[in-house]
Image (spheres, grey):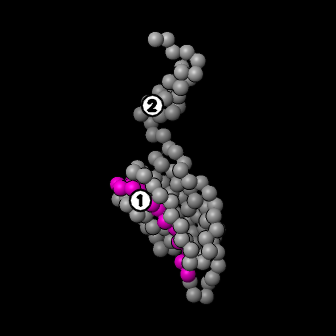
Amino acid sequence: MKITGLRAALLACLTSACGGDGSVVQVVVVEETRTLAEGAQFSYPLALGTYRAEISSGRNGVAVVWVGGTGCQSVTETRSYSAECTMSAVGAVGLANPTLLGVPGDEVVSIRITRL
């Protein structure tokens, strides 16, 4: 069977640029900026796989917690975070703006989660 046109382009993509040659294809699953009010929290559900989370916030920082993963680094409060986690079960990565006495305020948070 002869492969032409769109089918040939798709096959070329699958065998080279799209990772069909054994290279790892990275897929951005979350890329957004959001505001977390003081004491607020939010989570992103994740399927099985390995992920990299890159999170930055202003002012006081946010907490980052992984649920359902192995080799994951959770932190109680940070302004800049970058780590990988392998989800061995369906899980999530959660963000929280901890309530701090005397230091109230919203946190503007940039989130990028990539499936490796």
* Position of 64 relative to 85 (above/below): below
**Whether residue 72 can be seen here:** no
Which residue is identified by label 2? 20
**Tag 2: amino acid:** Gly
Q: What residue do we see at 56% from left, 74% from top?
A: 40
Residue drawn at point x = 53 percent, y = 67 percent:
42
Q: Quadrant of residue 34?
A: bottom right
Label 1 is placed on what type of residue?
A: Gly
Q: Residue furthest bottom?
A: 102
32 and 22: which is toward the camera: 32
Can you tell which of label 1 and label 2 is closer to the viewer? 1
Residue 103 is left or right of residue 47, and the answer is: right
Q: Is residue 97 magenta?
A: yes
Q: Where is residue 75 shown, x and y percent of the image?
A: 46, 70
Region in magenta: 85-99
Asked which secondary structure carries label 1, the reply is strand
Residue at x 57% of width, y 69% of height: 79
Residue bearing the label numbered 1: 91
Q: Residues within 10 Å of mark 1 (few under 14, many from 20)?
A: some
- Find residue 14 and report its horizontal and vertical position in percent: 49, 29
Relative vertical location of residue 113 with respect to residue 66 in this rendering, above or below: above
Compare marks 1 and 2 and give the one earlier in the sequence: 2
Residue at 54 percent across and 71 percent down: it is 41
- Quadrant in the rendering for residue 84: bottom left
Above or below, 60 relative to 112: below
Q: Secondary structure at mark 2?
A: loop
106 with respect to 66 (left or right): right
Residue neighbourhood size for the residue with mark 2, other residues' Cα within 10 Å, grouped as few (<14), some (14–19), many (≥20): some
Q: Are marks 1 and 2 in contact (CB under 8 Å)?
A: no
Tell me, yes or no, whether the highlighted magenta stretch contains residue 67.
no
